[in-house]
Image: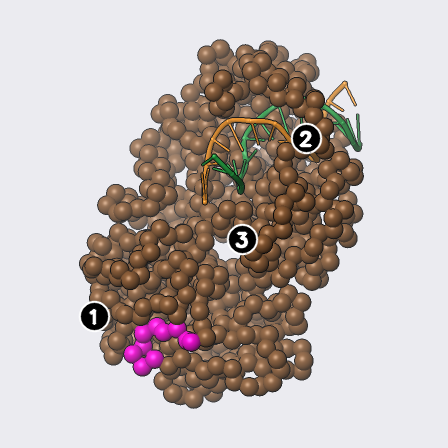
Chain colours: A brown, B orange, C green
Amino acid sequence: MDLLTFAADAVFSADPKEELVTPLTPKKGARSVFGEVTNTINISPEKLKNSPLQTLFTAPTLNTPKTKSRGLASAVTTPGSKGVIGRGSNGKSYSYPSPGTEAQTPNGDGVSPYLTNGGSGRSPPTPMSNLKLLTHIASMEESLTSKKVLFQNQSVSDKMTQSPSFVQTCVTSSSATKNLSSLRRYNSDCLGQSQSRLNRSTSTLRKHPTSSDYPRPSSPGNLVIEGMGQLPSVDETSTNRSSEGSRKDKSLGLLSEKFLEQFPMEVSILETPRRLVIDEVASMLGTERRRVYDIINVLESLNMAARVQKNMYQWRGKRHLEETLGRLKALGFRLDFPKRIGSSLSSDGEKTDTRREKSLGILCQKFLMLLLVSPEPHIISLDNAVRMLVGEVGEDGERLRTRGRRLYDIANVLTSLGLVKRVPTAKAFQYVGPEVAEVEREKLLQKEQLQCSHLTSDSVYTRTSQSSSLEKTKKQAMNTELQSVSSTASKITSLLQRRLMCRTEIPKALTFRGYQSNVCNEGQSSEQPKIEQLPMTPLNMMDSRAEQQTSNSSHQNSEGYKASHHEAREAFTSGSLIESCNSNYGQPMNKFFCTTSQNVKTSPVLMVNGGLVPLTVAQPGSHTGALTSTLPKNMQVIKVITRTEGLNQQESSTVITVLPAVQTQTFSQSSVPSKLVMHVNGGFQQVSTGTYTNGQKVTGSSNPLGEGETFSESLQGNPSPCTIFTVSGNHSGQRAFARVSSSKSPMNSQPTKCSATSVSSGNLSKIQLSQSQGLQSQLSATGSGDQVPVGFVHLQSNVSAGSKPLVGCHQNSSRQWQPSPEGSSTDSELEEIFGNSFKFTRPKSLVTGIPSQGGDPGNKV
DNA sequence: TCTTCCCGCCACATG
DNA sequence: CATGTGGCGGGAAGA
């Protein structure tokens, strides 16, 4: 898991106390705020009944004279209000305060500058018109299908066409007065700015470099988009445009389309997470960096991309999209959005990051939230959206106009994503994305209830820990919010803000330390497994000395603990699972009790700091089952891994909730089965006997692998690495698993078939890689029954044909983690393995998951 | 005329 | 201090 995911989790599962306790006066929906606003979207009365949205969506119509919408401001701002925009003599921006602080100016009167009844909307640019120029990448086939596959179940949108009348956007504004702040802006800044712009030539004075302005990255890491190989060399003619081509050809929507060609939304879970470098993308799209940021910001807000480091993002595709949408929807409902978003009345002067809160990402999330909570058919006019989302008190007309521009930007990207559709006959947008299941809300509520009890200890823990600055910031912000809950708008903003502020960072190298383990079976050990997190440290450079267990308090204070702690709240892998997982917040938890919903056809696995622990399902297939396990002291649950059989995305998701230890039940170690778990792209799939095609099991039984049994995984068009963990039952599985990792394969390689044989107790003794029929490389392993409990084995998946053994498992009788000679776990590789399972932060110093007293100086950085 | 939104300045954030 | 981010609004293309 990465920070962003966690942040999203934190955001959307925020403790109710984070939200407003004080019911807010819905000033935003009031006419005093919006001016005379008409929102005449047709909504079925039943749906509006009892809905707080009613007032918003059925406000009376009032036509007022048109006002000039361009140029000087056309809104009223009470003198003395904070609606001061512009730049002072010091060059600093005087931005509008955050919603929270904006709320301090309730006397402002936001008036829309927009005119009644928008003209004909621009028809969407033809998406495919320019794609031919840029789509010669090997992943073409996949990318071409990705968008079509996306949301194929939805029956969207043509409700609009069927009844276009239900969209009537009649937004008017009342009389608008020139605004002092606007005047000031014009006088102090924009005038000069526009003056300079008037004098410049767009092409010659272009400050932002285009892709062609950038030197080719010298580092291969920058040149290569991971998982896809080399970027296509960009046609020079495609990069030095700027003044060439029509406006449509350069639209953000089209750029997004191009982007999606290279980074398809459909991301196989078997595919290595791809990195995207801003410069490269800009080059690829034939645009400048600035535009890439526009796109990325939106994608990031949807959890489709995550920032890895400066100038680099990780592409996630739509894997988390639906969940994100679901959370947005749930949050929207929960916060009574948008009714209360506009009721920003804050008296606490809460400081917020105004720059962040105005970000395109936040705005995008709000926009989607608004669409999602709006009644069918999820249509909202631009004008209304602008006012509801950003039309804060005191916003002047120019401000709204600016935000309107941003909504256009967002909408264009969302359109390319297939989430939003322009309503042709109205200045409006319609949500046409996937149906966000109500179950998301239920899950959210469940999680809230669980996490509610955690918050207190969480806060205490925070105060006593040596948090990273980011952690401190987040926690302090949280505490502040808990103390002063007065503004829904500021809350939402803060929540969304935090979400955006938490980004994926470069992973630390991870390694596991085993321990002299003759006591594994008891599930108790005086020597505990450890997680070492080493920045950029190859595994084979690790000191494998086992450290003694330390006190709980120091453990709690460790970054590693926090990482685990956070990961324990990891929410999902695609297509299935995990609702919540408890780490007991400071109390080493050695028992777990999981409740499951939906069908649990395969036993979930606990990922702990040290390995994997299979759980048993009391009643497989039952709606609710008990899953219990016993772990050694201080072992922390990182993640719950389960699958509802195969990777079929259409299966009902499994919800597993791990409750505090006090609620646990007895767990019988003897019942721990042998498991084989395949790591795929940040998630885990428990592999059982059978054949899998495209992640879906097609043959075989569902029993865990036994000796001599085989499994295979056929990957059609997704020759990405697969990592196999063997969870050995005979030593409780806490840390004993072997890993087989194939390396990255070229994008254009043929379908890969992986097969492996495990032996009893999950030990892996021999691994082979072969290529069959010239089209498939085969990864196979055969078991011999020998005790080869741990080790890392690295295989190259693109080796030449033949059935020759490449490497054998590295055997380590002491059962400590040892690097295989040929294995070096780089950052990227470890990220590949644990990328979705750990919170990665670029460390300033080594931290250990379970710090030893005195630590391990040798590992300090 | 009005809507749409490209373009790139430049403030702020980050390294 | 350099450079990455991205808010912002002018103003032009397009309807």
User: Circle 3 — which element?
Assistant: strand
Within the image, what quadrant is residue A511 found in? bottom left
Q: Residue at x 39, y 29 (%)?
A: A351
User: Circle 2 — which element?
Assistant: loop
| Image depth: mark 3 or mark 2 in front | 2
Quarter of the image that includes the N terminus of chain A:
bottom left
In this rendering, is residue A819 above or below A236? below
Q: CA distance from mark 3 to mark 2?
A: 32 Å
Q: Residue at x 46, y 28 (%)?
A: A99
Left or right placement of residue A100 versus residue A712 in this view = left
Q: What residue is pinned by disc 1?
A: A526
Mark closest to the chain's N terminus, 2 or 1: 2
In this rendering, is residue A721 above or below A580? below
**Chief secondary structure of the magenta portion:** loop
Are the two marked residues, 1 and 3, in contact with CB atoms closer than 8 angstroms?
Answer: no
Residue A287 at what x, y percent from top left? 68, 42
Q: Which range of residues does the magenta coloring cover?
A: A812-821
Relative depth, front residue between A278 and A47: A278
Amino acid type of disc 2?
Leu
Q: Is residue A298 visible?
A: no
User: Circle 1 — which element?
Assistant: loop
Q: What residue is pinned by disc 3?
A: A314
Mark closest to the chain's N terminus, 1 or 3: 3
Residue A314 at what x, y percent from top left? 54, 53
Quarter of the image that includes the C terminus of chain A:
bottom left
Amino acid type of disc 3?
Gln
Magenta segment includes A818? yes
Within the image, what quadrant is residue A777 found in? bottom right
Q: Which mark is residue A205?
A: 2
Q: Is residue A835 visible?
A: yes
